[in-house]
Structures are given as structure tokens and as C-alpha cells.
Image (cartoon, rainbow, N blue to C red):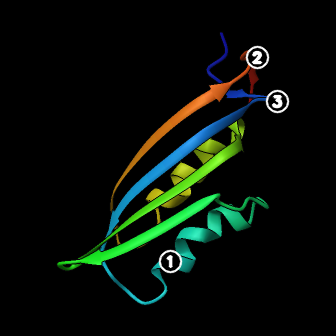
Amino acid sequence: MSFEPWTLLGQFATVHFSLLADPSPGLLPRLLQPFAKRDLSPDQFEAHRREGEVRVEIRLEAMPAEMVHLVEGNLRAVVGVRALSLRQEVTGSVRRRAA
């Protein structure tokens, strides 16, 4: 029996990351870094600072589905991120293979 994780291959997803973080210098570049190192550019990036917190919305219209969990993990690990939620819709038929 194999306990290897599964990944989605050859599929794209519309993805919306919503984050709540502590305001700090360098926060926004740190949030973009997981995308940049995978050669991805968000279609929309909005940040609003209010009452000691920063709310950030990041959207991608056609993100490779196999990268979503990797970017999510990187964003959760950014210093200052308090909460992260993710909405995604995988387009096309889903094929799976062991990672």
C-alpha cells in the first residue's frame, strides 16, 4: 500500500487567496515571492492596512493546479501571516497521479 500524496497534473485553477497579516516592512514582497519563484504573476493583488492589520487578496485566473498547495504552504509560512483562506475552482477534467 502506498501512502504517497496525490497531485493534480495538466489542469489549471482559478485561485483566490485571502490573507490577514501583521503590518510590517517587507510583508508584500514576501507574499509575492512564492509566485515569483514559480514564474507566476497574480492577475490581481490588493492590500489594505487598517487598525493594526493588513488584509491581502491575491487572485490568479489560470494557476497550474499542482502548484496551489505548494504556494498555499509557502504563504502560511510567511512571518506575520495570521490567517489564510483559499478558494479554487479546477477547470477541465481532473487527472491524478502519485507525487
Dividing the picture into quarters, in which one does residue 42 lie? bottom right
Can residue 5 be seen?
no
Q: Which residue is mark 3?
A: 10
Q: Secondary structure at mark 1?
A: helix
The amino acid pointed to by label 3 is Gly
Is disc 1 surrounded by few (<14), some (14 to 19) or many (20+) residues within 10 Å? Answer: some
Determine the CA span between mark 3 and mark 2: 8 Å
Q: Which x, y percent locates residue 30?
A: 54, 75
Picture residue at 50% right of the left edge, 77% below the top: 28
Can you say whether 21 is above or below 44 in the image? below
Q: Which residue is mark 1?
A: 28
Q: Which x, y percent locates residue 65?
A: 69, 36
Q: How many marks?
A: 3
Picture residue at 42% right of the left edge, 71% below the top: 47
Q: Is residue 26 left or right of residue 7?
A: left
Check contact, mark 3 vs mark 2: CB within 8 A: yes
Compare marks 3 and 1 and give the one earlier in the sequence: 3
Can you say whether 10 is above or below 41 in the image? above
The amino acid pointed to by label 1 is Leu
Q: Which residue is mark 2?
A: 95
The amino acid pointed to by label 2 is Arg
Closest to the observer, 1 or 51: 51
Determine the CA span between mark 2 and mark 1: 34 Å
Is disc 2 surrounded by few (<14), some (14 to 19) or many (20+) residues within 10 Å? Answer: few
Q: Which x, y percent locates residue 43?
A: 64, 58
Picture residue at 47% right of the left edge, 38% below the top: 87
Q: Which residue, as the protein is rendered here, is positioned at the far top? A: 1
Compare marks 3 and 2 and give the one earlier in the sequence: 3
Q: Which x, y percent locates residue 33?
A: 63, 70
